[in-house]
Image: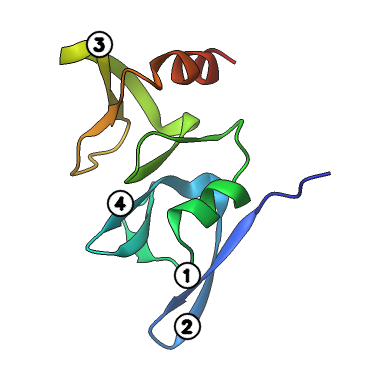
Amino acid sequence: MTRYKHTFVIHNHKKLIPIPVEKFVCFYIKKDIVYGYTIEDEKYPMDFSLEDLNKKLNPDLFFRANRQQIINRMAVKEVEFFYGRKLAVVLKINFPDQIIISKARVDKFKLWLDN
């Protein structure tokens, strides 16, 4: 039986902050650093690679959108059609980067979203 993370303990200055997994709208990589972005519009550097996070997160709740991002189902506001049969995901919060689902992953994404 696979056990998925329920909480991440974030090292923030001289504190440890427990943050429930559900509060993360996405995880993304920027300049070789992986960040978790929360519903409170805060980002935290993570101690995991995206590949490691993908294994630790419940796949019913989180989807590897592309090489740079993992998204939370509860954070998806809508999905727009993008050129080349790709999809663009719009989150419920103002996330600064565009989230694109490649045409190779569109069917898997639709099944995940519909589940």
Identify which amino acid the numbered label 4 is placed on: Asp
Quarter of the figure that contains the N terminus: top right
Furthest-front residue in view? 104
Identify which amino acid the numbered label 3 is placed on: Arg
In the depicted view, which residue is nearer to us: 73 or 70?
Answer: 70
Give the alpha-carbon distance from disc 3 to disc 4, as whole Å: 30 Å
Give the alpha-carbon distance from disc 3 to disc 2, as whole Å: 45 Å
Spot occupied by residue 64 in the image (x, y as percentages of width and height): 44, 37
| Lower sequence index among marks 3 and 1 | 1
Evaluate if marks 3 and 1 touch, with contact meaning CB atoms under 8 Å apart.
Answer: no
Q: Nearer the viewer, mark 3 or mark 2?
A: 3
Q: Which residue is mark 4?
A: 41
Q: Is residue 26 left or right of residue 8?
A: left
Give the alpha-carbon distance from disc 1 to disc 2, as whole Å: 15 Å
Identify which amino acid the numbered label 1 is placed on: Asp
Spot occupied by residue 51 in the image (x, y as percentages of width and height): 49, 52
Residue 105's tag is none
Which residue is located at x 28 percent, y 18 percent? Answer: 87
Q: Nearer the viewer, mark 1 or mark 4?
A: 1
Residue 85's tag is 3
Pointer 2 local density, CA inside 10 Å: few below 14, some 14–19, many at least 20? few
Residue 15's tag is 2
Q: Nearer the viewer, mark 3 or mark 1?
A: 3
Furthest-right residue in view? 1
User: In the image, is residue 30 above or below residue 76?
Assistant: below
Residue 47's tag is 1
Pointer 1 local density, CA inside 10 Å: few below 14, some 14–19, many at least 20? some
User: In the image, is residue 70 above or below residue 75?
Assistant: below
Q: Quadrant of residue 20?
A: bottom right
Q: Nearer the viewer, mark 3 or mark 4?
A: 3
Mark 1 lies on a secondary structure that is loop
